[in-house]
Image (cartoon, grey):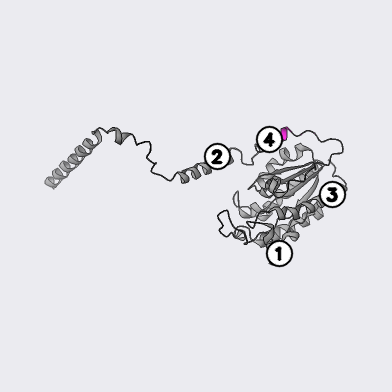
């Protein structure tokens, strides 16, 4: 046993000496400094994507409701002129994208203000509702939200919790003398494709039955609280219960034809809201 121990000890010492010798060997310039033309031993595209994700996560942690998105723009909005029929659209990407020129513009010549943020859910919108809606002093607010809740964009949330957030935004609006238009969540489909041409089935994250259930609640809440129900869904759904193929490229977001369907429906709902008795402050 003693002999075996001594042999093992000598072996450990020999290995340590060998490692030490390797460690103290001086590096040549070529070993220490990679050539300028050498590519890093990594996939730079993956690094860029990972960095973008980390930056996005950091931004969300620092400003979860994205209050900074419209802070500067809100500061530049003047008080409404006398008899101005100002309207604010609160929403997610469907509202956010509406202002892009390829979709025909956002109600040209109208004092309508878009305050959509892509990817947002109702708890985020509720937190920025005072800054992005009430502070702008509109006559009407059009709220389109809920599809990203169903998809779980900011984590698990029940339909009841989504409904509570919608109700709270509507209550805040009414309490500040703002007429409220609640829009239905739009249908989705599996007809679309992503940017690379791959098929998309938006129903996986946004089951049509949940959209129907939420829309039933929205319609009922609007009727019971003197709000206007804006029914995008019925005008955009096909006989399969899906978003009409010609109204979207990806099965979720409207294209120019989709916004052309939505615009007159929104305008009609706004006029109905303006004709109604304003809520008492």
For the point 35% across and 36% down, the residue is 35
Judging by the rendered image, the residue that carries numbered circle 2 is 58
Separation of residues labelled 3 and 1 (CA atoms) = 27 Å
Judging by the rendered image, the residue that carries numbered circle 4 is 71
Q: Is the stretch drawn in magenta largely helix, strand or loop?
A: loop
Q: Compare residues 71 and 179 and report the one nearer the observer.
A: 71
* Sequence order check, earlier mark of 4 and 1: 4
Residue 142 place in picture, x, y as percent? 76, 48
Residue 250: quarter of image: bottom right
Q: Nearer the viewer, mark 4 or mark 1?
A: 1
* Sequence order check, earlier mark of 4 and 3: 4
Residue 106 place in picture, x, y as percent? 74, 45
* Sequence order check, earlier mark of 4 and 2: 2
Q: Is residue 117 left or right of residue 6?
A: right
Say whether residue 74 is magenta: yes
Query: Do residues under tags 4 and 1 come within 8 Å of each other at their CB atoms?
Result: no
Residue 11 place in picture, x, y as percent? 17, 43
Say whether residue 28 is magenta: no
For the point 78% across and 50% down, the residue is 181
Separation of residues labelled 4 and 3 (CA atoms) = 28 Å
């Amino acid at each position: 046993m003693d002999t075996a121990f001594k042999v093992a000890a000598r072996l450990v010492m020999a290995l340590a000496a060998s490692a030490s010798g390797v460690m103290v060997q001086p590096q040549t310039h070529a070993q220490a400094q990679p050539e300028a033309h050498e590519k890093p031993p990594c996939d730079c595209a993956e690094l860029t994507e990972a960095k973008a994700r980390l930056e996005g996560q950091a931004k969300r942690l620092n400003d979860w409701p994205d209050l900074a998105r419209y802070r500067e723009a809100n500061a530049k909005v003047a008080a409404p002129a006398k008899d101005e029929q100002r309207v604010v659209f609160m929403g997610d990407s469907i509202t956010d994208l509406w202002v892009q020129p390829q979709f025909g513009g956002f109600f040209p010549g109208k004092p309508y203000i878009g305050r959509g943020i892509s990817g947002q859910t109702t708890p985020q919108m509720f937190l920025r509702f005072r800054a992005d809606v009430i502070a702008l002093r509109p006559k009407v607010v059009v709220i389109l939200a809920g599809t990203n809740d169903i998809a779980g964009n900011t984590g698990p949330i029940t339909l009841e919790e989504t409904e509570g957030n919608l109700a709270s935004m509507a209550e805040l609006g009414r309490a500040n003398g703002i007429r409220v238009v609640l829009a239905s969540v739009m249908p989705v489909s599996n007809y679309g494709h992503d940017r690379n041409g791959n098929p998309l089935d938006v129903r996986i994250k946004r089951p049509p039955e949940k959209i129907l259930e939420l829309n039933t609640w929205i319609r009922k809440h609007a009727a019971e609280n003197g709000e206007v129900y804006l029914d995008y869904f019925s005008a955009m759904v096909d006989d399969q219960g899906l978003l009409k193929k010609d109204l979207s490229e990806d099965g979720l977001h409207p294209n120019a034809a989709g916004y052309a369907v939505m615009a007159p429906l929104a305008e009609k709902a706004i006029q109905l809201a303006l004709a109604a008795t304003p809520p008492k402050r």
